[in-house]
Amino acid sequence: MKQSNLYGKLLVLLLLCTFASGCWGARETDEVALVVAVGFDKGKTEALEVTATVANPRAFAIDGGGGNAKPFLNISVEGPSIWECYTILNSFLSRETTFSHTQVYLFGEELARQGIEDYLNDLIRQREVRRDSGLYVCRGTAKEFMDKNKPLLEMSVAKQYQFMDRMAKVSGLFHNRNIHDYYSTYKNLHSSPTLGLVGVSRGKPEDGKQAAEPLRVPYVAGEVPRTGENKAEYIGAAIFNRDKMVGEINGDENRTLMLLRGDFTVSSFTIRDPKHPNKTVVLRLRQGQRPDIKFKQEEGVLKIYHTVYLEGEFVSIQSGEHYEDPVKQKIVEDAFDRGMEELARELIDKTREKDWGDIFHYDRYYRRELSSWEQWENLNWQEIYNNADIMVDFKTNIRRTGLVRKMVPPYKE
């Protein structure tokens, strides 16, 4: 018995020595070049141009040896595939590049319209590529966007990319999708994938686009009328049919899309004052609960009943009208609901007119109505969606008044 205990202890010691000796194949941090962003464009001489934003270790040297060295460097190469470009990068850099810390992958618009399936397949098979990395489409080229993206509030461009994913949940004007989100929708039989849209600021909207009206944010990335040093913009979304980009939607359409999908978090909405049309009311709203989606067949036509629930508070009442009163509050809620229902109808009609398909993922709910995989596989969802009668109903509950319970009118003599 004692001898067997001794052998057991020796075995444990041998195992500890084996597994505590470090990890095989590890690379020291001073042996690798960290790539924080990768852009893909159609090449001029080759099929593909890859632009990599690489962290410059000299700029982060503890002893200050970097001097005025740039913290991040953009390097572009051309080749027939992503990993051939990766190999070429390693032919002139002194450190081996790694995608294990890459925050975002960006596709230029021309390449996205041509199709990204081949490049997506290259990414998901490689061990270093994390599926939770952001995926975006750039209006113009990814290279131009990466060159002109100069964060104002962050020292690290990697931190900026990370924070912009979070900012999508604050504004709702663009949405963050990662590699896994896109790939799972792409592999679905019936849904149309979407990706966030980024671009380089041109300083003004394209001709024919009007200034923003209440509830409307008619801008896409690159068109926001604004000033500032950093030219990078995130607003709107790119619409895909399978792996090809077929269109784009603006800021308010993206927010409406997020609301209908149930992916919305929180945002501020400006509407016209129902009693004072020259004034506005601002609401801060969040999704109260997941949307309720029901189906009903009537005379061969599918009817989709879609209810969106919102709750929140008053942020501003310019007119001073006592909308905090429950009776008058209902007037504001109804005005907002009717406005959002109009936006929803317009976006649904737009997807049908342009033959974009189901970007709202109704098919995922309809799947419950079927009894077998064969039915799902043979379903002509595109035709069913285009002919469906979709009724969207918004139900908003303003639960809080902010820091003012009742606006006191100014004293008049």
Image: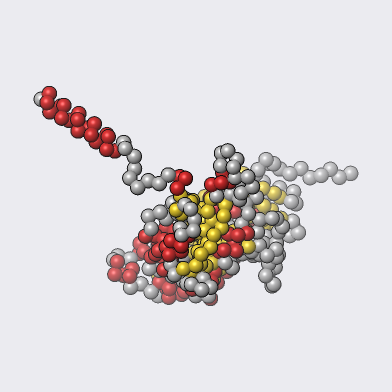
In the image, 179 versus 285, the foreground residue is: 179
Q: State the scheme by which the image is colored.
A: secondary structure
Q: Residue 260's x, y, as percent? A: 51, 60
* Relative to 33, residue 10 above or below: above
Q: Residue 107's x, y, as percent? A: 51, 65
| Image point (52%, 58%), residue name | 52
Question: From the viewer's perspective, is 151 left or right of 89?
Answer: right
| Image point (59%, 61%), residue name | 145
Q: Residue furthest top?
A: 2
Task: Report if residue 212 is visible in the image.
Answer: no
Q: Residue 164's x, y, as percent? A: 56, 52
Quadrant holding the N terminus: top left
Q: Residue furthest left?
A: 1
| Image point (37%, 55%), residue name | 127
| Image point (76%, 43%), residue name | 408
Quadrant holding the C terminus: top right
Q: Residue 152's x, y, as percent? A: 65, 50
In the image, 202 versus 1, the foreground residue is: 1
Question: From the viewer's perspective, is 317 left or right of 349?
Answer: right
* Relative to 36, residue 401 above or below: above
Tell me how many marks there are.
Answer: 0
Q: Residue furthest right?
A: 413
Task: Report if residue 209 is visible in the image.
Answer: yes
In the image, 213 versus 108, the foreground residue is: 108
Question: From the viewer's perspective, is 151 left or right of 379?
Answer: right
In the image, 43 versus 245, the foreground residue is: 43
